[in-house]
Image (cartoon, rainbow, N blue to C red):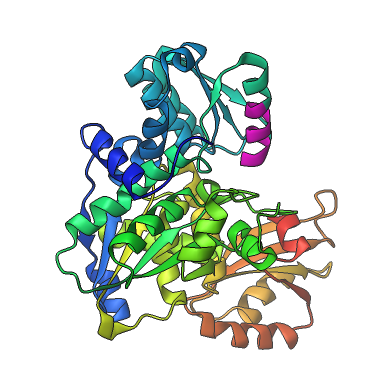
């Protein structure tokens, strides 16, 4: 690539974007500060234009195109946020764009893409994952001659994302900051922030937060090079990338101190905490950094911790799944297959002899629809405390009923729910 990624390119991006993007706030979190015993600051990219930092990289990239390239138009692949940034940039700069999305992209993000892009953009569904969409977009690039706007693995994109770090250092109320935690998908955001922080504040610890179900950077580091994941949980859609970038990987390898994995259930719990306590709406990837705080070693003597809230594009229809994953992760919801004998009163005995105070049935569904008298039933039970599980299991073991627990993460659990 002819573009050079360095401190000067980041400075140029910051100057260009100063009149385009929103300078997002750096807010103090009382909840997280009290929880961890150290000042926790939140960089609020969830309130950015298009509600994500992705607009920074997209606009910086597209604005760099020559007149000839602009005439050919642009094409991109995205799980949603990069697409909104591309759509906004196309509309603002008057450039035609074609956007390939995976089928898992939430409806809310699709609608926003069209709102931002208007008549300047076209949406195409390209497969079930970001990598499927990327392959389809690359094929269109070859066929049409359009310019491919990479979501994370291009110097112009990374330089744009790095401006989050530029703003962050300018906004810090004190130089006494020990750690910055950054969500990781393909690596563009953390690579850009790491380049800037290492040049300005090499003393700051940089930690990446990656979803357990899409550990592409973790696998790449173990392999000493990008490697495609064989399977992936796409729930954290903004960070569900099957292979990190060839450009982002060495930057992360050389400049980032640690990558931690965060279970999807823990991310869901943090999303609910942010909403219920701070009134902040994040998408799953947006809550990655704050959810990771309980999984890192925080040196309270060295100063504040900054977490990047990377995006706020969450579809309200997903909250039932978010609550479900959170309850299961916290040990407050459990599922069982219960075979009731073909005799009167068996369900009543289950309620009276097995369940105790504070244990509620939230799901009851016969597995065999054609034989409800003798077939097993899927029973979901909510507990007031995870400590109550041992008592419930003891009563089940001593019950004459045939009861099998459905463990989270098992193939049976996935099939039933």
Q: Nearer the viewer, residue 393 or 217?
A: 217
Give the percent coordinates (x, y) of residue 384. 47, 76
The magenta-colored residue range is 129-138
Q: Is residue 132 magenta?
A: yes
Q: Is residue 88 magenta?
A: no
- Residue at 42% over, 25% down: 87
Side of 102 relative to 73 (left or right): right
Give the percent coordinates (x, y) of residue 299. 33, 83
- Residue at 45% over, 68% down: 292
| In this view, 283 is above or below 271 | above
Quadrant the C terminus occupies: bottom right
Q: Nearer the viewer, residue 276 or 85?
A: 85
| In this view, 175 is above or below 55 | below
**Residue 247 visible in image:** yes
| In this view, 88 is above or below 274 | above
Q: Main secondary structure of the magenta part?
A: helix
Give the percent coordinates (x, y) of residue 404. 77, 74
């Amino acid at each position: 690539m002819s573009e050079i990624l360095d401190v000067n390119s980041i400075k140029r991006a910051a100057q260009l974007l100063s009149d385009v993007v929103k300078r997002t706030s750096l807010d103090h979190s009382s909840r997280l500060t009290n929880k961890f015993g150290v000042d926790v600051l939140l960089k609020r990219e969830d309130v950015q234009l298009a509600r994500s930092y992705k607009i920074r990289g997209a606009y910086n990239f597209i604005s760099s195109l020559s007149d000839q390239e602009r005439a050919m138009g642009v094409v991109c692949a995205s799980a949603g946020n990069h697409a909104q940034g591309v759509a906004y940039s196309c509309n603002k700069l008057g450039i035609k764009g074609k956007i390939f999305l995976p089928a898992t992209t939430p409806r809310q993000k699709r609608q926003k893409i069209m709102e931002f892009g208007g008549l300047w953009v076209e949406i195409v569904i390209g497969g079930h994952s970001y990598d499927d969409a990327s392959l389809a977009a690359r094929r269109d690039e070859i066929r049409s001659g359009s310019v491919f706007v990479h979501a994370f693995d291009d110097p112009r994109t990374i330089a744009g994302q790095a401006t989050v770090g530029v703003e962050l250092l300018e906004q810090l109320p004190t130089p006494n900051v020990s750690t910055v935690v950054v969500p990781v998908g393909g690596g563009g955001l953390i690579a850009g922030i790491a380049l800037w922080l290492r040049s300005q504040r090499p003393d700051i610890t940089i930690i990446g937060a990656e979803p357990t179900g899409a550990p592409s950077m973790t696998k790449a580091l173990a392999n000493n090079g990008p490697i495609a994941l064989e399977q992936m949980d796409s729930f954290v859609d903004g960070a569900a990338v099957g292979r990190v970038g060839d450009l982002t990987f060495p930057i992360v390898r050389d400049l980032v101190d640690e990558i931690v994995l965060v279970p999807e259930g823990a991310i869901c719990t943090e999303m609910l905490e942010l909403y219920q306590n701070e009134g902040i709406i994040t998408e799953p990837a947006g809550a990655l950094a704050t959810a990771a705080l309980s999984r890192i070693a925080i040196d309270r003597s060295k100063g504040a911790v900054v977490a990047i809230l990377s995006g706020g594009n969450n579809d309200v229809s997903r909250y039932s799944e978010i609550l479900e994953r959170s309850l299961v992760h916290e040990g407050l919801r459990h599922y069982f297959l219960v075979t009731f004998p073909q005799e009167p009163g068996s369900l009543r005995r289950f309620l009276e002899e097995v369940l105790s105070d504070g244990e509620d049935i939230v799901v009851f569904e016969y597995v065999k629809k054609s034989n409800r008298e003798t077939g097993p039933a899927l029973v979901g039970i909510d507990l007031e405390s995870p400590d109550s599980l041992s008592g419930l299991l003891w009563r089940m073991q001593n019950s004459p009923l045939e009861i099998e627990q459905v463990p989270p993460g098992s193939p049976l659990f996935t099939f039933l729910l």
